[in-house]
Amino acid sequence: MADKPTKGLADVVAASTALSDIDGKAGLLFYRGYDIHDLAGRTTFEETAHLLQHGTLPNRDQLADYGAELVRGRALGSLVEQNVVEIAEKQEPMEALRTLLSLTSADDPDKDSNAADANLRKAARLTALQPILVARFHAARRGVEAPEPDPDKSIAANFLRQITGKEPTPREVEIFDECLVLHADHTMNASTFAARVCAATLSDMHSAVVAAIGTLKGPLHGGANEQVMRTLEMIDPAGVADAVRAKLAGGEKIMGFGHRVYKTEDPRATHLRRLSEELGEASGDDTYYRMSKEMEEVVFAEKGLYPNVDFYAATVYHFLGIPTDLFTPVFSVSRMAGWTAHVIEQHADNRLIRPDSEYIGAREQKWVHIDER
Ligand code: ACO
């Protein structure tokens, strides 16, 4: 008979990883031993993806090679080209992303191989492809052509230009790039766990990241950033405290607060709060930033909960001109770096992930013929 389960697998160590580490009491996050506070604002998303997938921060030559691989990896396959318009008509953004990403395996020459070199090539292609898929989806649903990505520009610069249709300022690119770095990996979060469970059956990287995208979509995980913005849009700026208290009194969870692992401030929220403040001031209307600050104070006073990564990411993306329903796809664009690195790690030292369950159903049932039920 199985032991009593830990509900939600809280505190259960499900895998060994050299990719990221969290100290939930101290509020620290490390990517391969580097403190996120040292990486944020100093290391680009491309360098961070290389760190996670290849194991080291790249030198200039390695970064140039990896950058060239990313540029080559942007080519969309024929299945995406043929279907993106209909998908954009009929599916919501995360649903569409799940479908589009799945279609890309058809044109991947390494799709059937889990070998280390094939996995590294696929990791780069998936990291490069995903922002283009989001941009193509967004263009298709508006009936316009997405601007071509510029091979000399970063993922952050191209994405902002493709989504907003405007040339972002250098500072906007830096800020968005920092957001991508902050979301790139986070130990055994739900979507990464889903990716590893899939990979551990010796299924392929595309299947694993499709499982991860489906898992990220939920409002208790990546979907929270969109819900944060929807909440801010619904609340009267003069009535933030009352609105939060009313939600709590009604037993509602406040999106963007609380975390399974952090018992103090999420270190990513520290950076995102600063970026939200900067962009709010620069926009000339920092209402949403000020409302967020007030929400943070009220939720802490009422429940002792801290904002998580999704809370201030919402206003940062809003101030950058990203449509609210693309916030979770943006999270996915970043987390692809971590998911793919976890699949590489899982395949390198694999064992099927197959936990047990505690049976709580009826026992000793007597079968009766269908005519007698
Ligand atoms: N608002 C109000 N109360 C909350 C919140 C919240 N955001 N988060 C937790 N609580 C309360 C719960 O109601 C519960 O109270 P109780 O013990 O009186 O019933 C207690 O704190 C523990 O909450 P759980 O949901 O059991 O904690 P768990 O570790 O399972 O969940 C989670 C963590 C899912 C992040 C939770 O805090 C939550 O739902 N937050 C809102 C959604 C969100 O922001 N998700 C993004 C997380 S970050 C990420 O995935 C990228």
Image: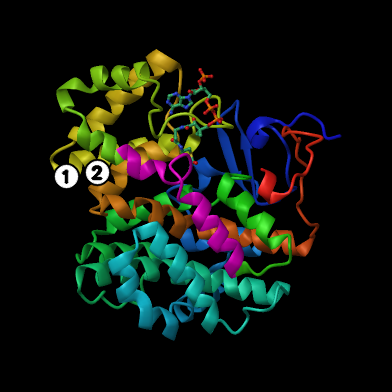
Foreground residue among 34 and 195: 195
Q: In screen coordinates, is 154 left or right of 185?
A: left
Label 2 CA crowd tier, 10 Å (few <14, some 14–19, many 20+): many
Q: Which residues are magenta?
A: 206-228
Q: Secondary structure at mark 1?
A: helix
Q: In screen coordinates, is 278 left or right of 20?
A: left
In percent of the image, x 73 and y 66: which residue is there? 202
> Where is residue 61 shown, x and y percent of the image?
56, 74
Residue 283 circle label: 1
Q: Quadrant of residue 90?
A: bottom left
Do we see residue 93 in this rendering? yes
Foreground residue among 276 and 215: 215
> Where is residue 216 shown, x and y percent of the image?
49, 50
Q: Main secondary structure of the magenta part?
A: helix
**Outermost residue toward the front in this view:** 371
Count of labels shown? Answer: 2
In percent of the image, x 38 and y 71: which residue is there? 132
Quarter of the image where the N terminus is located: top right
Q: Secondary structure at mark 2?
A: helix
Residue 279 circle label: 2
Foreground residue among 165 and 28: 165
* Mark 1–mark 2 distance (CA, rounded to whole Å): 6 Å
Verify whether residue 222 appears in magenta: yes
Q: Are marks 1 and 2 in contact (CB under 8 Å)?
A: yes
Q: Name the residue type under label 1.
A: Ser
Q: Is residue 308 above or below residue 70?
A: above
In percent of the image, x 31 and y 24: which residue is there? 295
